[in-house]
Amino acid sequence: MSELKLNSLYQQLILEHYRSPKNRGKLDDATVSIRMRNPTCGDDITLQLRVDDDEVIQDVRFYGEGCSISQASASIMTTLLKERSLDDAIQIAARFTALMHGDEDAAKDRSLRDLRALQGVSKFPVRIKCALLGFDALQEAVRKTRGEPALEA
Amino acid sequence: MLETAAGATPLDVERLRRDFPVLDQEVNGRPLVYLDNAATSQKPVQVIEAIEAYYRSDNANVHRGIHELSRRATELYEGARKTVARYLGGVDPEEVIWTRGTTEAINLVAASWGGANLTEGDEILLSVMEHHSNLVPWQLVAERTGAQLRYLELNDDGTLRLDDLDGLLGERTRIVALTQVSNSLGTINPITEIARRVHDAGALLLVDGAQGAAHHGVDLTSLGADFYAFSGHKMCGPTGVGALWGRRELLESMPPWQGGGEMISLVERDHSTYAPIPHKFEAGTPNIAGAVGLAAAVEYLEQIGPAAILAHEQDLTRYAMERLQTLPAIRVFGPEDPSMRAGVVSFVLGDAHPHDISTILDSEGIAIRAGHHCTQLVMKHYGVSATARASFYLYNTRDEVDRLMDGLATVHSIFA
């Protein structure tokens, strides 16, 4: 049983994104850059976006280090963000957060695409924060772009 | 002291394990293998029952009441202080101050001694091996007083660069704060030798005994420390209780650091006079049950013998290091010679992040620690963000090391 649970966590897609992350690197012309760390475990992600005047994400990169879940989650996230509006980005973050907290509807939500491979993380409560680290950075990036106050100190 | 405890009688581990109810359970369908002892140890029934008995029949506040229960509680509480003083090598019980643990003990010295004695330009010497609890309190007092922090660096084998020590000890060095045993590398530091050099330079030495007190016993009459801080929960005692030992003349010269009941002699409108040590540093109702539990833990460890416990841990460490070295892409941190380390083995395994290692091991019922172990400066030295750490105690077995190896084989199959 625990082996099944483990297999649901470490899906091939997740391991592939961990080994060969998408959109990894730095953006020279980023309009916003957010670094998020998980102080208890050392996961560390910097997310960079180039957002145009119409609030459309033109480009995205991330770098940092951490466990397979944090890195794969950030990698898959970036594949969903290009050409999307900040409102879409917030919506994706909200749906993914719901997925992590066991929301059945979110699990069927096709708009989350490959992010649904991370559904197994919801069975590992201590790892949920790993999966959400990139999304925390995304939400912070949206707030910063819009001139809203940061949530994280 | 560096005691390798050769020739100690082997522990009857199977019998000892029966004292620890928590070990008798399955986690994720497998018998629990608890290898996170450097974080906190499990508690024997002797400790659990001592705490229960205290609450069932003796609970009252200490040093206040004239009634029978208060007398009993006070006797247990002060008796516990004597037991701990005996464990520390037979020091004066009045030099033993109860704290919440190592962290609070170090904060007490940094705030009280540091606040009263450090001035701008004075130096505090630390090492990059220190746990955050022996770094941050000094950073706080340095900020307040203008004192400077200096650091003893690490050799790549996880030992301190002691060749640099005399050069770092300057005229302005007032205090040196070092750990006895590294919680992330397992290194046992030669404290007595260091103490001699620190004292020759006219400075004081605080020793962080969080791991040391639990894993190789301690004799403060010969160690050479001026202050010694430790926690009960890492040595079979309850959480929330530990102690600071300090040389009497230092403790007597230090100002109180928290005010309240228990620590006073006379209170008037605008000032008070303080109780003598140790009570001067023990404001408020203390953790009486915690002290009682810690005394029971000390008696338990004394019965087994700290030397035998260290020998057992080092045997497991040697075995674990031998077996780990057979894995491809393993990197083990800390001294290669198991006799130079306590029962702590930190490692990384190929591309598998320590969190992933820990999750996979947990799915097989094996508890280890993954992360920076509150030693971010050590992680930085080795250029890693985290390690996996297995740490052993008196109740662990070679079979459990084998289970760890089986778990790491699963890690390898997923991440290779």
Image (cartoon, rainbow, N blue to C red):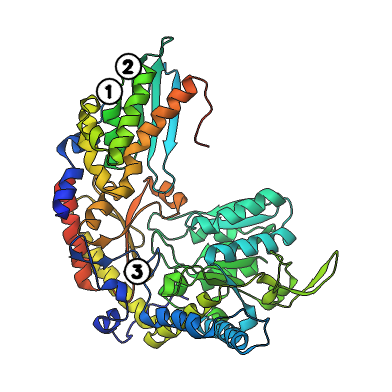
> Helix or strand or loop: what does disc 2 sit on?
loop
Q: Nearer the viewer, mark 3 or mark 1?
A: 1
| Mark 3, other Cα within 10 Å: few <14 / some 14–19 / many ≥20 | many
Q: Nearer the viewer, mark 3 or mark 2?
A: 2
Q: Are marks 3 and 2 on the same chain?
A: no
Q: Judge whether B246 appears above or below B354 on screen.
A: below
**What residue did someone put label 3 on?**
B343
Residue type beneath disc 3: Gly
Q: Are the residues at dot 1 and dot 2 in contact (C-beta closer than 8 Å)?
A: yes
**Chain of the residue that carries numbered disc 1 in the rendered image:** A
Q: Are the residues at dot 3 and dot 1 in contact (C-beta closer than 8 Å)?
A: no
Q: Give the Cα separation between the discs numbered 3 and 2.
A: 52 Å
B57 with respect to A69 (left or right): right
**What residue did someone put label 2 on?**
A84
**What residue did someone put label 1 on?**
A80
Q: Give the Cα separation between the discs numbered 3 and 1.
A: 46 Å
Q: Residue at x 57, y 75 (%)?
A: B224
**Chain of the residue that carries numbered disc 2 in the rendered image:** A
| Mark 2, other Cα within 10 Å: few <14 / some 14–19 / many ≥20 | some
B26 with respect to A128 (left or right): left
Quadrant containing the C terminus of chain B in the rendered view: top left
Residue type beneath disc 2: Arg
Q: Quadrant of residue B267?
A: bottom right
